[in-house]
Image (cartoon, helix red, strand yellow):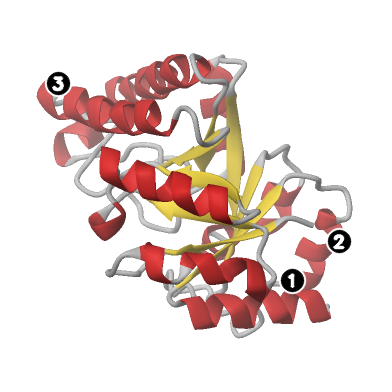
Amino acid sequence: MRVGLSCLYMTDSPFEWVYSLDDMGFSGWEIVCEGAQRLTKDVVERIQDVLRSTSLDFTAHLPFSDLNLASVNQPIWDESVKQMGNAIHLLGEITDLVVVHPGHLSPLGAELADKAWGKNILGIQRLCDIAREYGIIVAVENMPNIHHLLGRFPEELKGMIQNVDRVNVGMTLDVGHANLTKTLDNFLELDFKHMHLHDNFGERDDHISLGKGSVNWNKVLKRLKSYEDRLVIEARTVQEGEESLNWLRRL
């Protein structure tokens, strides 16, 4: 079982602690391309140093704050595709999978829902076409229970991926998000290429340690018996990530 760590709420540089992930028992690292982890050529060089110095697998979460692949405001949509696409170009030689959030409905987008859906599909297609140059899979993540977000429900996300119609598109199953939308059972029945693990109490996207919320981990573990791709624990701190890893292994 390949288990990586992503520290979603880290505000400092990851490069002081990522070298310790091997010793903790992690086999991978997923960077979130935002804030202090925003991709630049210098950051990519530091990532490459990590990968040369460790045995970690590496995946990346494309930027999402203030971006919207479903925007019906053309300049905003253009900028969203540009920033995510530039990240893929920078990651091209160092990963084989990137995670992307589907778009969301702005006030105008809610009035033009079909157009927003079409822009979202086109945006993911554009990212897949860029990623295909490098042999990268674009794994679209299911979203939490916030009304204006696309991709919250199993059939919706499945349909989104089918409409994208690219050989290098897949699904990231976020277990915590599925717990929030009360759809975990149905999501576990789908085909996914990547998994995010964190816990909550079914109300807010808390990202607490595994086993401390209401996620039915027995169902998740049963599905993991037939799952061969990567798992990524999304934690608020490295310490909570290590705690989650140890809890998972005890099961």
Q: Badge 1 local density, few (<14 within 10 Å), some, or many (20+)? A: some
The answer to whether residue 38 is seen in the rendering is yes
Picture coordinates of residue 57, whole percent (x, y) = 62, 48
Residue at image position (73%, 44%) is: 229
Q: Earlier in the sequence, mark 1 or mark 2?
A: 1
Which quadrant holds the C terminus?
bottom right
Mark 1 = which residue? 217
Q: Earlier in the sequence, mark 1 or mark 3?
A: 3
Marking on residue 74: 3
Picture coordinates of residue 132, whole percent (x, y) = 52, 16
Instruction: Using the numbered discs, state the Cα–Cα distance from disc 2 to disc 3 in whole angstroms.
Output: 44 Å
Which quadrant holds the N terminus?
bottom right
Q: Secondary structure at mark 1?
A: helix
Instruction: Using the numbered discs, state the Cα–Cα distance from disc 1 to disc 3 in whole angstroms.
Output: 42 Å
Amino acid type at image mark 3: Gln
Mark 2 = which residue? 222
Q: Is residue 68 above or below residue 46?
A: above
Front one among 36 and 141: 36
Picture coordinates of residue 176, whole percent (x, y) = 56, 64
Residue at image position (56%, 15%) is: 166
Residue at image position (45%, 14%) is: 129
Q: Earlier in the sequence, mark 2 or mark 3?
A: 3
Q: Secondary structure at mark 2?
A: helix
Q: Secondary structure at mark 3?
A: helix
Amino acid type at image mark 1: Trp
Q: Is residue 127 above or below residue 148?
A: above
40 sits left or right of 240 in the view: left
